């Protein structure tokens, strides 16, 4: 359950110098994690932007303070993952292209006790999805089923998500240990990465 | 709300798990993934890091430029507002006398520092007038001329 959100206090929000230092400390693997996450979300951008635009936007918002990072709570990579997910969701639901969206400034970002941040401006766009949007999600899930077709365990996990279960529920349903579950998810991540989650209207049901 | 299955939630739950898996994988596993995807992790890192650092530089430059402009605007406003302070000590004393008289007329008592300017050395007069200017107590140019 999502906890009550509270703003990141100004004195805990990372400064540009701290952000720069954190960037310099990122490993090659961290930087690949960021790229992968951004690319994984491209299917939601509906050709309005690319994954690298999303990563760039998340980083710009961090710099300008419209999304504040409390470095005592989460690492930079985790923070940027969350920011990209949130921005991507807002862009997906916005009718206009991301570059046409107003840039709304600082102090509106809020954060829950686990360091998950959200921006009320983005939340404005977080209405219930339309039927058209749900169709895109459904097609994406079908596409993922195609990608994972030969992997029975991955299909079991997908089925768990379709049933609306949380990961512990899925593990319990199928009797997977945490390690088994993690191994399957890693396999899913790699297969999805290889195949790409393409945009449904491009109709790619056909990556082996 | 319709009874349509919430495919967005299902997909989000899956994305959460893919993110978690990526964050929890070891660096060695992630580098192996990159190579399997035909990406040189070092080149990717160099390019992304350069992009991030360039953004930091641009941001700092913008911030510096904004501060410089704000300072310039403030200085400009101050210089426009600046009272033409007489140069000779005699004129400066006359101006101070005028201010004290005007304030007394308005029922405002200035502190002793301002009232006792007669005993001040000439070199201190300008500073005193600048303080009065900052307090908005100097007469308009017309009044003083």
Image (cartoon, coloured by chain):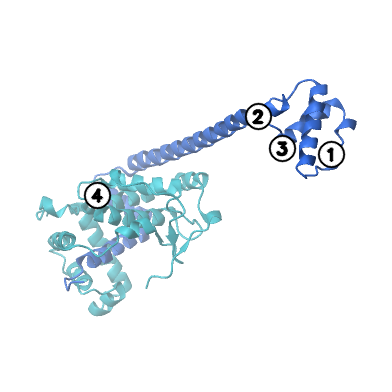
Chain colours: A cyan, B blue
Question: Gap between marks 4 and 1, in whole Å?
Answer: 81 Å
The residue under label 2 is: B82
Asked whether residue B50 is in view, the answer is: yes
Name the spot of residue A66 as percent of width and height, x first: 43, 51
Decide if residue A93 is on the left or right side of residue B110: left
Decide if residue A122 is on the left or right side of residue B109: left
The residue under label 1 is: B113
Q: Earlier in the sequence, mark 1 or mark 3?
A: 1
The local secondary structure at tag 4 comes to: helix
The residue under label 3 is: B137
Q: Which is nearer the eye, A28 or B58?
A: B58
Tell me the subunit letter for badge 4.
Answer: B
Question: Gap between marks 4 and 2, in whole Å?
Answer: 69 Å
Q: Earlier in the sequence, mark 4 or mark 3?
A: 4
Q: Which image quadrant: the C terminus of chain B?
A: top right
Q: Earlier in the sequence, mark 3 or mark 2?
A: 2
Bin the neighbour count of mark 3 within 10 Å (Cα to Cα): few under 14, some 14-19, many 20 and up.
some
Tell me the subunit letter for badge 3.
Answer: B
**Tag in front: 4 or 1:** 1
Question: Gap between marks 2 and 1, in whole Å?
Answer: 22 Å
| Same chain assignment for discs 4 and 3 | yes
Question: Gap between marks 3 and 2, in whole Å?
Answer: 12 Å
Q: Earlier in the sequence, mark 4 or mark 2?
A: 4
The numbered disc on residue B36 is 4
Name the spot of residue A137 as percent of width and height, x first: 18, 61
The residue shown at (34%, 56%) is A122
Asked if labels 2 and 4 touch by Cβ distance under 8 angstroms, the answer is no
**Tag in front: 1 or 3:** 3
């Amino acid at each position: 359950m999502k906890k009550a959100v509270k703003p990141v206090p100004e004195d805990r929000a990372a400064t540009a110098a701290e952000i720069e230092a954190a960037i310099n400390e990122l490993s090659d693997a961290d930087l690949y994690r960021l790229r992968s996450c951004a690319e994984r979300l491209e299917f939601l951008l509906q050709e309005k932007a690319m994954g690298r635009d999303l990563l760039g936007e998340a980083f710009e918002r961090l710099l300008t303070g419209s999304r504040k990072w409390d470095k005592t709570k989460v690492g930079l990579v985790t923070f940027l993952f969350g920011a990209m997910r949130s921005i991507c969701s807002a862009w997906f639901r916005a009718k206009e292209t991301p570059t046409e969206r107003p840039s709304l400034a600082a102090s509106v970002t809020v954060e829950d006790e686990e360091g998950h941040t959200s921006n009320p401006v983005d939340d404005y766009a977080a209405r219930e999805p339309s039927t058209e949007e749900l169709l895109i999600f459904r097609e994406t899930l079908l596409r993922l089923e195609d990608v994972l077709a030969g992997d029975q365990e991955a299909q079991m996990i997908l089925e768990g998500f379709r049933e609306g279960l949380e990961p512990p529920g899925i593990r319990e349903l199928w009797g997977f240990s945490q390690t088994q579950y993690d191994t399957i998810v890693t396999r899913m991540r790699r297969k999805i990465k290889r195949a790409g989650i393409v945009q449904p209207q491009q109709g790619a049901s056909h990556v082996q | 709300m319709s009874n349509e299955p919430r495919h967005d939630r299902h997909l989000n739950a899956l994305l959460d798990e893919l993110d978690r898996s990526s964050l929890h994988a070891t660096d060695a596993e992630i580098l192996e993934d990159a190579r399997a995807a035909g990406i040189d992790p070092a080149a990717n890192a160099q390019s992304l890091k350069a992009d991030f650092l360039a953004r930091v530089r641009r941001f700092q430059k913008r911030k510096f430029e904004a501060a410089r402009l704000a300072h310039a605007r403030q200085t400009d406003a101050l210089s426009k507002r600046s009272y033409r302070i007489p140069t000779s000590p005699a004129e400066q004393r006359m101006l101070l006398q005028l201010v004290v008289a005007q304030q007394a007329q308005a029922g405002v008592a200035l502190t002793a520092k301002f009232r006792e300017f007669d005993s001040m050395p000439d070199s201190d007069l300008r500073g005193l007038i600048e303080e009065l200017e900052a307090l908005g107590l100097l007469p308009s140019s017309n009044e003083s001329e």
